[in-house]
């Protein structure tokens, strides 16, 4: 994020405070509120009301909220900023040119959601959504639960979301978003949230897809659940989940085929008969698609990921089985150079090699 710009806008607030305020936690995995586990029972018999820790801390909280509001006004929570991280760096200029500004909205009980920006290429979809809760609700993204610590998601205060909501005499509202897996051939998906206040957040979505077309007609799926703090003994009720859809039309950024590669030994990896490997260059970087057919010795649990010598992939991706039983590996946002041969190593969950195969360009 452009921290210097934020600092200037706020007349030189201490850089260390800015760094702390701009931090957010990325969800370890994407979850909609339809959690199949029961909520913890009888969590707290006594729910203490949250108290401030002094005037200095209250002032710091005001500065953090001012920072978030100003940063949001300057669009510092857009795709360019939320995409960037130390591993893959800044979003390439070519990809920035593909970003579309959007205004599609949906309104549910207790909240409003608006798609603000989108990016689409042959392999990847990126979205940002602004979510605002009505008065009377404490907002959180769907990868959290009532027992999430406030500080772990960047909100001011101590204790859990449930304790905070009780102290504020408000309900908890969990909101998440996703894309239709079958419609887009989604192969992997991730979501994380940036909190601007206890009633405002920005959701960042990143999906790897296999369906490609010049124009993508789809929807953004919104799932929300209202939870009464202090009353968490209820069984899971599907009827309690709000489900909304925001129609979405995106133009697809064009990629360039780098090459199609065939394995020297299709049976070099135990349990698989490997097919073609395709490399394309998209505005976000190199994408890889590999197909295969499981054999009698195939054990899906043996495979965690693969590595390509001389390349690194930083997008959501992975390997597994399609509904028709075929094997696939899909990775995107790669950096490196593609030669006439590729050396690919399959790794297990201990990151030990399962086998290595050489692919030759056709």
Image (spheres, rainbow, N blue to C red):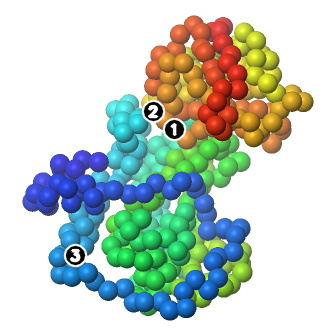
User: Which residue is labeled 1 in the image?
Assistant: 315
Q: Give the residue at x 68% y 34%.
A: 348
Mark 2 to mark 1 CA distance (whole Å) = 9 Å
Question: Front-most of 163 and 2?
Answer: 163
* Residue 284, numbered circle: 2
**Quarter of image, res 319:** top right
Does 266 appear above or below 9? above
Question: Front-most of 235 and 132?
Answer: 235
Farthest residue, direction left: 11
Does 186 appear above or below 232? above
Q: Give the residue at x 58% y 26%.
A: 307
Farthest residue, direction right: 296
Picture coordinates of residue 245, whole percent (x, y): 60, 63
Q: Give the residue at x 58% y 83%.
A: 43
Question: Which numbered mark, 3 or 1, is in the foreground of this view?
Answer: 3
User: Which residue is labeled 3 in the image?
Assistant: 57
Secondary structure at badge 2 equals loop
Q: Is residue 63 visible?
A: yes
Q: How many marks?
A: 3
Question: Front-most of 117 and 3?
Answer: 3
Picture coordinates of residue 185, whole percent (x, y): 68, 42
Mark 2 to mark 3 CA distance (whole Å) = 41 Å
Picture coordinates of residue 113, whole percent (x, y): 47, 67
Q: Reading the chain from its start, which is encountered first: label 3 or label 1? A: 3
Describe residue 301's horizontal placement relative to residue 359 as left or right: right
Q: Give the residue at x 34% y 76%.
A: 157
């Amino acid at each position: 994020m452009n921290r210097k710009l934020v600092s200037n806008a706020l007349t030189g607030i201490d850089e260390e405070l800015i760094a702390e305020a701009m931090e957010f936690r990325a969800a370890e995995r994407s979850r909609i509120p339809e959690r199949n586990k029961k909520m913890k029972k009888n969590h707290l018999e006594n729910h203490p009301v949250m108290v401030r820790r002094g005037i200095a801390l209250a002032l710091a909280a005001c500065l953090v909220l001012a920072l978030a509001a100003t940063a949001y006004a300057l669009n510092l929570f857009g795709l360019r900023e939320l995409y960037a991280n130390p591993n893959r760096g800044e979003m390439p200029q070519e990809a920035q040119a593909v970003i579309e500004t959007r205004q599609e909205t949906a309104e549910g009980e207790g909240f409003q959601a608006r798609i603000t920006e989108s990016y689409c290429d042959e392999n990847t979809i990126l979205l940002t959504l602004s979510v605002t809760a009505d008065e009377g609700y404490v907002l959180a993204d769907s990868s959290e639960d009532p027992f999430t610590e406030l500080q772990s998601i960047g909100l001011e205060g101590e204790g859990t979301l449930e304790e905070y909501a009780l102290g504020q005499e408000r309900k908890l509202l969990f909101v998440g978003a996703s894309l239709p897996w079958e419609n887009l051939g989604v192969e992997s998906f991730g979501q994380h949230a940036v909190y601007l206040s206890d009633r405002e957040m920005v959701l960042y979505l990143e999906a790897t897809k296999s369906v490609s077309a010049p124009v993508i007609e789809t929807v953004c799926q919104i799932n929300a659940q209202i939870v009464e703090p202090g009353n968490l003994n209820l069984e899971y009720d599907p009827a309690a989940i709000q489900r909304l859809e925001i129609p979405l039309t995106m133009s697809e950024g064009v990629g360039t085929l780098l090459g199609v590669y065939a394995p020297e030994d299709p049976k070099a990896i135990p349990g698989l008969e490997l097919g073609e490997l395709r490399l394309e260059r998209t505005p976000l970087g190199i994408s890889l698609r590999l197909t295969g057919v499981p054999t009698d010795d195939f054990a899906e649990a043996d495979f965690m990921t693969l590595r390509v010598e001389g390349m690194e992939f930083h997008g959501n991706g992975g390997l597994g089985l399609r509904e028709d039983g075929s094997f696939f590996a899909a990775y995107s946002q790669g950096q490196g150079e593609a030669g006439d041969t590729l050396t690919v190593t399959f790794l297990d969950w201990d990151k030990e090699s399962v086998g290595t195969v050489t692919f030759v360009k056709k």
